[in-house]
Image (cartoon, rainbow, N blue to C red):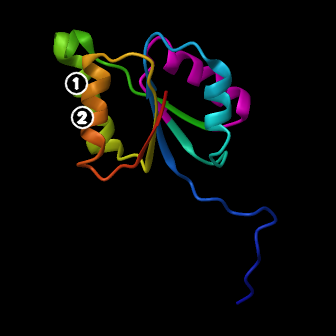
């Protein structure tokens, strides 16, 4: 059997969770932080205002082909929806790495950060 080598290098397909403060507005830092990951990575974010809105713009500009937005389902879970979304991201999607753009704290972001270490998900806190 003849084995062909791929014409392009094969990069690992990481699942990278990106989340952050709703008042984050530094698009340049988001761009430079995301640019270290292979373009084959799947970027997962929460679809929130601020950091995640900028992340959504930048992953498309940088050429990441796979983006997943996991929204909080308020109609289903009410006020606890962000916490249930965090459980879904950490326990079901199981990202390989997390990048958190931290300008200010909020209960949902604090909950997400607290879930990462017990799940053995390394995190890079950008502040």
Q: Nearer the viewer, residue 59 or 116?
A: 116
Instruction: Check disc 1: other Cα within 10 Å, few if <14, some if 14-19, many if 20+.
Output: some
Q: Measuring 18% from the left and 10% from the top, which residue is drawn there?
A: 79
- Count numbered badges in the picture: 2
97 to 107, vertically: above or below: below
Q: Measuring 58% from the left and 18% from the top, which residue is drawn there?
A: 54
Q: Position of residue 56 (x, y in %)?
A: 58, 23
Instruction: Check disc 2: other Cα within 10 Å, few if <14, some if 14-19, many if 20+.
Output: some
Q: Measuring 26% from the left and 49% from the top, which residue is drawn there?
A: 119
Q: Position of residue 126 (x, y in %)?
A: 50, 32
Judge from the rendering whether residue 68 lies leftward or rightward of residue 120; answer left or right: right
Cα separation, mark 2 vs mark 1, equals 6 Å
Does residue 59 belong to the magenta stretch? yes
Q: Nearer the viewer, residue 51 or 73?
A: 51
Query: As drawn, which residue projects farthest toward the bottom?
Result: 1
28 to 39, vertically: above or below: above
Q: Are marks 2 and 1 in contact (CB under 8 Å)?
A: yes
Describe the element under mark 2 as helix, strand or loop: helix
Describe the element under mark 1 as helix, strand or loop: helix
Q: Nearer the viewer, residue 32 or 92?
A: 32
Q: Measuring 52% from the left and 51% from the top, which residue is drawn there?
A: 14
Q: Quadrant of residue 83?
A: top left
Q: Position of residue 92 (x, y in %)?
A: 29, 43
Does residue 70 belong to the magenta stretch? no
* Numbered tag placed on residue 83 in the rendering: 1
Q: Position of residue 7 (x, y in %)?
A: 82, 65
Residue under pointer 2: 87
Q: Which residues are magenta?
A: 44-65
Q: Quadrant of residue 76?
A: top left
29 to 98, vertically: above or below: above
Give the quarter of the figure containing the N terminus. bottom right
């Amino acid at each position: 059997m003849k084995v062909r080598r791929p014409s392009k290098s094969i990069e690992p397909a990481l699942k990278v969770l990106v989340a952050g403060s709703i008042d984050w507005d530094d698009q340049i830092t988001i761009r430079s932080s995301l640019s270290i990951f292979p373009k084959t990575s799947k970027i997962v974010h929460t679809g929130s205002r601020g950091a995640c809105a900028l992340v959504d713009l930048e992953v498309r500009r940088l050429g990441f082909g796979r983006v997943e937005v996991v929204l909080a389902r308020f109609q289903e879970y009410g006020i606890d929806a962000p916490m249930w979304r965090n459980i879904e991201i950490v326990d079901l999607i199981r990202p390989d790495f997390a990048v958190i753009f931290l300008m200010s704290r909020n209960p949902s972001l604090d909950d997400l950060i607290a879930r990462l270490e017990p799940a053995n998900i390394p995190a890079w806190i950008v502040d």
